[in-house]
Amino acid sequence: MNTDKISVLYIDDEDHNLVSFKASFRRIFNVYTADSAEQGQKVLEQENIQVILSDQRMPRMTGIEFFESIKDSHPDPIRILITGYTDINAVIDAINRGQVYKYLTKPWNEEDVKNFVEKAYEVYRLRKDNIELTNKLLDANKKLEFLARQNLLS
């Protein structure tokens, strides 16, 4: 897989949606698909996914429940919920429980999906960069404290 492309996981129990998503975006993203939350979990274990899109209404586990279930084990990927139903309670749950970044309705518009994924990746990168810069700052601070203590002792 091309490492310059954003790695996207799309989870939907409807096979034609998975095929359509892959056909639409495989040239611009590294696209992984899963037809269930369980299969989505397996993909997350094997691949470095940066953005996850999940259908809300699936058998056994909703999109929100899936996002909530991976909060601790895979906190970094940015989450986008997709649904054919405009249920405001699902949106509120998604934001509160599943740490969802965006909410899309079906049928989705290709340009909207592309833009949302790219913006989600920007958030992903900024979070990673922030962590890296914070760690460098903490390290520099420790070194300065050490030098200050050395100067006080001499």
Image (cartoon, rainbow, N blue to C red):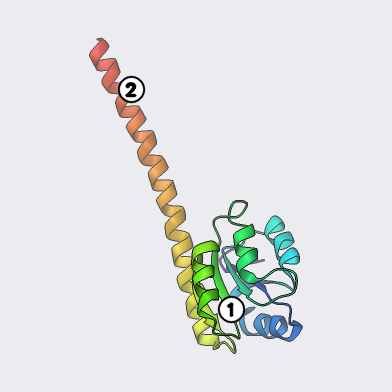
SS type, badge 1? strand
Residue 105 is left or right of residue 13, and the answer is left
Residue 94 is left or right of residue 123, and the answer is right
Q: Earlier in the sequence, mark 1 or mark 2?
A: 1
Q: Quadrant of the N terminus?
A: bottom right
Q: CA distance from mark 1 to mark 2?
A: 51 Å
Residue type, mark 1 in image: Ile
Q: Percent from the top left, x then y, of residue 118?
A: 48, 73
Q: Mark 1 and mark 2 in contact? Answer it, CB < 8 Å.
A: no
Q: Is residue 10 above or below residue 77?
A: below
The one of 43 and 1 positioned closer to us in this rendering: 43
Q: Residue, x 73% and y 86% (percent of image)?
A: 16
Q: Quadrant of the C terminus?
A: top left
The one of 54 and 44 positioned closer to us in this rendering: 54
Q: Which mark is residue 146?
A: 2
Q: Which mark is residue 82?
A: 1
